[in-house]
Image: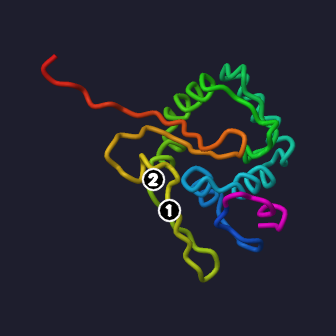
Amino acid sequence: MERADVRAASTTHIRAGYKLQVRDLLNLLLIASDNAAARVLARVSTLGAKGFIDRMNTKALELGLTSTSYADPAGLLAANVSSAHDLAKLITHVSADERIASIMRKPTYSFQAGRRTVEVHSTNQLVMRGDVDVQAGKTGFTRSAGYCLATLLKLPQERGR
């Protein structure tokens, strides 16, 4: 972890100098909405941070997300844009990928940072409550957008109809 990864991250549970596994970073990103984890994943990717963002935009186009454009991996810059329709398509797509969706359904996650155990909790209150069947979901917050939630739920089937 580098200082630049955690600088001005609105949400992070990691500190400069931590040595984490990619699985820890993915869990931090998708469960705790950890912005620094997103930056680290982009920076350490084989594409580098800029190439990672370019790949995010290419993937958005491949998925038909025509109103979506990414400017940074954490989604904090005002230049990141999307639509409710695109986010619905995206969350439906990721719900089919069990590697990602299984992380999004976890209420908590813990990891070792040196001798310290760090435990994080989902920012998705539907996951934390556990009374609905969340297939996949992601929260977010920016000043301009406010609190956001994209979640795919499996509704119980009604009997007797």
What's the residue at 46%, 60% (across, down)?
108
Asked whether, in this view, residue 151 is left or right of residue 56, the answer is: left
Q: Position of residue 11 (x, y in %)?
A: 67, 59
Quick one: SS at disc 1?
Answer: strand
Would you identify the image quadrant in which residue 34 lies?
Answer: bottom right
Would you identify the image quadrant in which residue 155 lies?
Answer: top left
What's the mark number on residue 60? none
- Residue that badge 1 annotates: 109
Q: Residue 159 versus residue 94: which sits nearer the camera? A: 159
Query: What span is in magenta?
Result: 1-11
Q: Is residue 86 above or below residue 77?
A: above
Residue extending furthest top? Answer: 161
Q: Position of residue 77 (x, y in %)?
A: 80, 43
Q: Position of residue 20 (x, y in %)?
A: 67, 66
Q: Residue 30 versus residue 82: which sits nearer the camera? A: 82
Tags 2 and 1 touching, CB below 8 Å: yes
What's the residue at 79%, 55% (across, down)?
44
What's the mark number on residue 106? 2
Q: Amino acid at mark 2?
A: Lys
What's the residue at 42%, 46% (across, down)?
126
Q: What is the CA distance from the residue labelled 2 to the residue labelled 1?
A: 7 Å
Q: Residues within 10 Å of mark 2 (few under 14, many from 20)?
A: many
Q: Which color mode does the image show?
A: rainbow
Q: Amino acid at mark 1?
A: Tyr
Quick one: SS at disc 2?
Answer: loop
